[in-house]
Image (cartoon, rainbow, N blue to C red):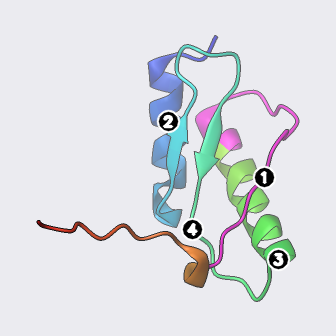
Amino acid sequence: MIELDEVVELADAVAGSDGIASGMGTYGYGIQVVVEAEHSDRAVELAMAVLAKAVEKSGLPSWPVVSVETIAEDEEMFYDVVEE
């Protein structure tokens, strides 16, 4: 099971990529990072490189990746607060 200190190490390792980490109390871990790329496939390549370095730095096991998602800057969802 992933411990808090391991998630903190992972979060520290991805912080340079505006990243966050998750997984405490579970049997897996995850990251969310910001990369700049020409297209989605390249974004995945860059993010996977960030993940590999972060996992090595944090000392977590290198498990298979089961899910990857990309979102373009112009696809981000912004929620406006409407005051009535």
How far is disc 2 from disc 3 in space, using C-alphas? 26 Å
How far is disc 4 from disc 1 in space, using C-alphas? 13 Å
Could you tell me residue 13's position as x and y percent? 53, 49
Q: What residue is shown at x 81% (from left), y 34% (from top)? A: 62
Label 4: few (<14), some or many (≥20) within 10 Å? Answer: some
Q: Is residue 28 above or below residue 83?
A: above
* Mark 1 in CB contact with mark 3 (< 8 angstroms): no
User: Mark 2: which secondary structure?
Assistant: helix
Q: What residue is shown at x 74% (from left), y 57% (from top)? A: 69
Residue 9: image tag: 2
Residue 60: image tag: none
Q: What residue is shown at x 49% (from left), y 69% (from top)? A: 77
Give the residue pinned by disc 1: 68
Disc number lying in front (4 or 1): 1
Could you tell me residue 56's position as x and y percent? 70, 41
Give whichever of 23, 9 is nearer the camera.
23
- The amino acid pointed to by label 3 is Arg
In the image, taking residue 10 as reference, residue 8 lies left or right, namely left
Return the disc, 1 or 3, that comes first in the chain's sequence. 3
Return the disc, 4 or 1, that comes first in the chain's sequence. 4
Give the residue pinned by disc 3: 42
User: Mark 3: which secondary structure?
Assistant: helix
Give whichever of 13, 38 is nearer the camera.
38
Query: Which quarter of the picture shows residue 55?
Result: top right
